[in-house]
Amino acid sequence: MHISHTMTLSPFFVIVAIIVTTGYAQICAVKDTSLDCRNRNLSTVPSFANIPDTITHLDFSFNNIKTVNKFNISLSSSIVEISFAHNIITTIQKGVFDNFTKLEHLDLSYNKISKDSIKDEDLDFEIGRAKRLTLQGNDLGSLEDLTFVPFYFLKLEYLDLSYCSLKSLQDMSIINLGNLKFLNLSYNFLSDFDEGFYQEKWA
């Protein structure tokens, strides 16, 4: 915001202008190419103006975020990785990642995302841009047919479903993941797979 006559403003308004333009420094720390917002007791994702143009990674891990609402980050088109690990997220509202056109890695590990939240499309469609999606530590229970279809994962290469309490995988649960190269299913409760699971994807 440009202020052409700062001398005519009251001290209150001058202070507000400073907070708006440098607010990220009061909440988070800049570490190399990362905006580090870990362990800040955040319940929502802050909006930041004028973050350094070197920032490519956003880290909101170890907070108390339940719903990811749409937030404004300047230079969002430069962000390639966002971590929401170790929150209590159940929902990512539509349009959250609209402006994150270069997003490659989304870490949602150790949240409260369930198979029902995925099935009910409570997660934002734009996570489909990611090449790497980490869902480790969410209590999914099972993957049903067409689980990931609503998100149009045209680029996804890496999917981490470890520690997700998975008991079953249906044969068409990952049918649309055409570029998938790595699938981590370790530390689950899987004893067998539907016959078509491997045939459909890796035959």
Image (tube, rainbow, N blue to C red):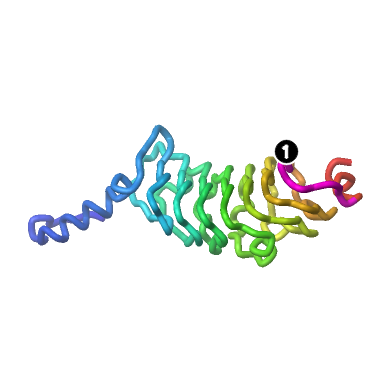
Q: From the viewer's perspective, is residue 15 above or below residue 59?
A: below
For this orientation, the residue located farthest to the bottom is 120
x, y percent for residue 91: 56, 62
* Image quadrant in which you'd find residue 121: bottom right
x, y percent for residue 189: 76, 48
Q: Label 1, secondary structure: give it.
A: strand
Provide the major secondary structure of the magenta segment.
Answer: loop
| 79 in magenta | no
x, y percent for residue 46: 39, 55
Q: Residues within 10 Å of mark 1 (few under 14, many from 20)?
A: few
Quarter of the image that includes the C terminus: top right
Question: Residue shown at 17%/55% (left/top)?
Answer: 15
Magenta range: 185-194
Residue closer to the observer: 116 or 71: 116
Question: Residue shown at 72%/56% (left/top)?
Answer: 141
Which residue in the protein does label 1 denote?
182
Residue 5 placement, left or right of 133:
left
Residue closer to the observer: 14 or 191: 191
| 191 in magenta | yes
* Image quadrant in which you'd find residue 33: top left
Q: Identify residue type, mark 1.
A: Phe
Residue closer to the observer: 72 or 62: 62
Residue 62 placement, left or right of 177:
left
Question: Residue shown at 73%/43% (left/top)?
Answer: 185
Residue 125 placement, left or right of 169:
left
